[in-house]
Amino acid sequence: MESTVTLAGHVHYSFRKFKVDEFYIDVDYSSALNLNISAAVNAQYSTNLYNYNPLSVSVSAFTIPGIIDVGPMVNFGLGIEFAASGVVKASVDVVSTITDAQVHLDFLDSAKTSTTGWKPQTNVTTDITAQVELQLNPFADLTVALGVKLFNGLLDMSAGVEAKPQVVNVFAADFDFAYTSASGVTFAKPTEDQCKNGAWFASTFHLGVDAYVTQFYTKKLYEVDVPIYQSQCWNFVH
């Protein structure tokens, strides 16, 4: 994954009132994600969630002793939701780009927090070597945050934006296979008269963007499901 993140913000602290009157950050974000996931299973049934966090960085940007300590943080993780029944070898290749996303994150007023530009361009290819029941859902998880501690840590106003692109796939050899994704994505199965052999598949690209201010609010800024394959019969299964 290649990404560019730019942070800018403003904070106004009134010494007369002993309070923060204005506090916001603006995040500019662009990324190019290429995930290639392969899996092999030889079992009756298995279901797992794998996570890998290759990057976690935080720095202290500036401090006013006893009043405020501010530092940006970045966390990046990869993962797979996986469920299968039978013997299978499968791979999923995902290429997704976001060119110009922006977030305005207001620490004091959730109504002023907004976002634009989260329009992913995505291409997905899948290869399966067996007629089985399978769900193989790769995802990336990027969090850009600003750690903020006031009054020697008495008040935590850390805030951030989390973007999680995910491909949700299901390949079923019969109508009984059921596995739900943490993304909340569900698929409507074809009816039995549509798929006489009971085999069906579906795939969609899901992107969720959430903003949060610790102890104060969490707000969903953007969510989209882009169908890759609508639920349809798996015609080569006999």
Image (cartoon, rainbow, N blue to C red):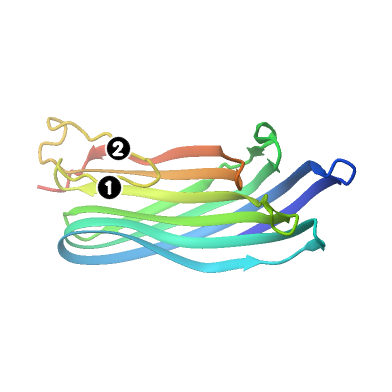
For the image shown, how many numbered marks are present on the structure?
2
Q: Which residue lies at the image location 67% right of the left edge and 49% below the top edge?
A: 157
Asked whether residue 13 appears in the rendered view, the answer is yes
Residue type at mark 2? Phe
Q: Which residue lies at the image location 50% right of the left edge and 50% below the top edge?
A: 164
User: Where is 129 relative to 113, above or below?
Assistant: below
Q: In this orientation, which residue lies closer to the viewer: 78 or 200?
A: 78
**Callout 2 secondary element:** loop
* Image location of residue 196, percent across then percent down: 10, 36
Q: Which mark is residue 170?
A: 1
Q: Which part of the image, by quadrant, shows the N terminus?
A: bottom right
Contact flag, marks 1 and 2 (Cβ < 8 Å)? yes
Quarter-wise, where is residue 128 in the image? bottom left
Residue type at mark 1? Val
Write down the residue under mark 2.
187
* Image location of residue 189, percent across then percent down: 23, 35
Q: In this orientation, which residue lies closer to the viewer: 17 or 32?
A: 17
Q: In this orientation, which residue lies closer to the viewer: 131 or 46?
A: 46
Q: Earlier in the sequence, mark 1 or mark 2?
A: 1
- As drawn, the residue found furthest toward the bottom would be 54
Left or right: 231 in relation to 27: left
Q: In this orientation, which residue lies closer to the viewer: 23 or 3?
A: 23
User: Where is 141 relative to 112, above or below?
Assistant: below
Q: Which residue lies at the image location 17% right of the left edge and 54% below the top edge?
A: 132
